[in-house]
Image (cartoon, rainbow, N blue to C red):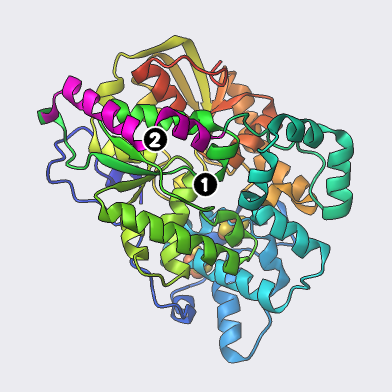
């Protein structure tokens, strides 16, 4: 869906009806979807991997063609499905609503379960990458030591030799205090409730557009362990608008698990997330996520792949954090005329998973309201890293080839800082250009709340 079809913040939103971003989940047998394909190849021309890797057969083959083959006989899944980066660009490009991403995820799961050697180096490496949530708590117990060890070239060399994790990239640093530690120290929901009430009184309750005063924050792994600045900014920005923030128990959204065909792991995470988030919805909260891949997962992949009680409610009530404020508050007017510490220019990359949710235009439009802020859109190409894809040694060169167009546009923008809403896109942006990267919510925090930035906005 394009931004043009979405409600804008310009008009009254009293009778705002949330738009169904994704069609209702189809039945789990995807073969009827294969019949909707009329072989136009639009998906192939939109696939960033197929564009630079001649050996990758592309989404049309991975999706409808494989499903047709499987209909005839018990055909094996082609191993090229593991070369799909799960960027999901083909999914939104298809004019015939073929459920490509659902087909790819299902085929990958089947390939891993039935054809992959679970003792192979590739399986072990993929399992480790897909389960960052299990390793991150260990790494963040002694963050300085972990960061030191992980930054050693010997560690990176070993990672490549033993596991096939590229030594070209630097591992992301763990924060010295996780978001959840900060949140507990700050007083949790009780403090947030108090601050939100004060903000509502200050702003005048009658002026609120939204009956909901509570949001449940799905922070994901990266904002908790690596970039808590993003999560803190979300809390402050939402409290500024009078929302009480609750932070439910949560596991990984599942995005890296889908991309690696680890559907059993993803299902276990989804069971916890759906249970906790559905309970928050029951208590009057809407769900917001600061990572575009997390919101994508909760909204689209969960109902496409799993059948869990409450899953449709969670999908229907989950929003991207910027989108939610754009729709439910007059965010544009609120940002109009605000300033940040000093004039700034940003090179903005819209993540593929934001693009797939129709959210690629909102950040540039909103940042233009802040005085002294200049935001350059660096184009619609894929960053190339796609979560764990670009961390695999065999994909590194392809990943950098895909990212080349974005790197070039970022260099041309000659901005102060890079900007995006996806943690792994931010790793690739930094890696390919040397820019320091920040998140849109941090800029809003600086503009609306006046929070002094923690060095990520330069
Ligand atoms: S874009 Fe859709 S209809 Fe066209 S080839 Fe791909 S799957 Fe088939
Ligand atoms: S998800 Fe991305 S990489 Fe995979 S087939 Fe579709 S467009 Fe290509």
Assign the magenta stretch its main secondary structure: helix
Q: CB of residue at label 1: within 8 Å of ligand 2?
A: yes
**Residue sitting at x 17%, y 46%:** 16
Q: Position of residue 244 (x, y in %)?
A: 29, 36
Cα separation, mark 2 vs mark 1, equals 33 Å
Q: Earlier in the sequence, mark 2 or mark 1?
A: 2
In this view, 439 is above or below 373: below
Q: Secondary structure at mark 1?
A: helix
Front in this rendered view, residue 144 or 5: 144
Please provide the residue range marked out in magenta. 178-205
Q: Residue furthest left?
A: 206
Q: Position of residue 416 (x, y in %)?
A: 57, 17
In which quadrant of the rendered image does the C terminus lie?
A: top right
Say whether residue 392 is left or right of residue 418: right
Crowdedness near tag 2: few (<14), some (14–19) or many (≥20) residues, C-alpha within 10 Å: some
In this view, 373 is above or below 155: above
Residue at the spot of label 1: 352
Q: Is residue 190 magenta?
A: yes
Say whether residue 270 is left or right of residue 83: left
In this view, 457 is above or below 188: above
Front in this rendered view, residue 338 or 144: 144
Say whether residue 253 is left or right of residue 210: right
Q: Which mark is residue 188?
A: 2
The total of numbered circles placed on residues is 2
Q: Position of residue 26 (x, y in %)?
A: 38, 73
Q: Position of residue 101 (x, y in %)?
A: 52, 64
Q: Secondary structure at mark 2?
A: helix
């Amino acid at each position: 869906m394009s931004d043009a079809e979405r409600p804008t913040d310009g008009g009254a939103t009293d009778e705002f009806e949330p738009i169904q971003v994704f069609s209702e989940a189809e039945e789990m047998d995807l073969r009827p979807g294969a019949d909707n394909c009329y072989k136009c190849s639009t998906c192939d021309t939109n696939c960033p991997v197929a564009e630079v890797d001649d050996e990758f057969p592309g989404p049309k083959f991975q999706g409808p063609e494989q499903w047709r083959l499987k209909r005839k006989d018990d055909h094996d899944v082609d191993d090229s499905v593991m070369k799909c980066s799960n960027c999901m660009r083909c999914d939104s490009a298809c004019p015939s609503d073929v459920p490509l991403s659902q087909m790819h995820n299902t085929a990958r799961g089947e390939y891993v379960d039935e054809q992959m050697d679970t003792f192979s180096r590739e399986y072990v490496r993929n399992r480790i990458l897909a389960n960052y949530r299990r390793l991150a708590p260990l790494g963040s117990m002694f963050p300085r030591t972990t960061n030191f060890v992980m930054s050693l070239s010997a560690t990176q060399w070993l990672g490549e030799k033993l596991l096939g994790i590229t030594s070209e990239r630097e591992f992301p640093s763990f924060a010295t205090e996780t978001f959840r530690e900060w949140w507990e120290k700050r007083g949790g929901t009780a403090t947030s409730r108090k601050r939100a009430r004060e903000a509502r009184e200050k702003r005048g309750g009658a002026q609120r557009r939204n009956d909901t005063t509570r949001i449940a924050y799905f922070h994901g792994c990266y904002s908790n362990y690596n970039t808590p600045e993003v999560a803190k900014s979300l809390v402050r920005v939402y409290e500024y608008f009078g929302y009480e923030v609750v932070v439910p128990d949560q596991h990984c959204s599942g995005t890296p698990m889908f991309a690696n065909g680890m559907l059993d792991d993803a299902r276990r995470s989804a069971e916890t997330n759906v249970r906790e988030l559905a309970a928050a919805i029951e208590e009057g909260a809407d769900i917001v996520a600061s990572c575009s891949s997390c919101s994508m997962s909760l909204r689209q992949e969960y109902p496409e792949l799993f059948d869990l009680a409450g899953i449709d409610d969670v999908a229907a009530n989950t929003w991207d954090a910027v989108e939610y404020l754009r729709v439910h508050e007059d965010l544009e007017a609120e940002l109009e005329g605000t300033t940040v510490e000093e004039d700034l220019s940003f090179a903005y990359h819209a993540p593929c998973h934001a693009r797939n949710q129709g959210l690629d235009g909102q950040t540039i439009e909103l940042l233009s309201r802040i005085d002294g802020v200049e935001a350059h859109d660096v184009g619609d190409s894929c960053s190339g890293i796609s979560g764990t894809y670009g961390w695999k040694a065999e994909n590194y060169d392809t990943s950098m080839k895909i990212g080349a167009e974005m790197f070039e546009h970022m260099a041309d923008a000659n901005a102060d800082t890079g900007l995006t809403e996806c943690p792994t896109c931010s790793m690739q942006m930094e890696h390919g250009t040397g820019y320091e990267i920040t998140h849109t919510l941090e800029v809003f925090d600086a503009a609306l709340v006046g929070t002094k930035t923690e060095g990520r906005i330069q």
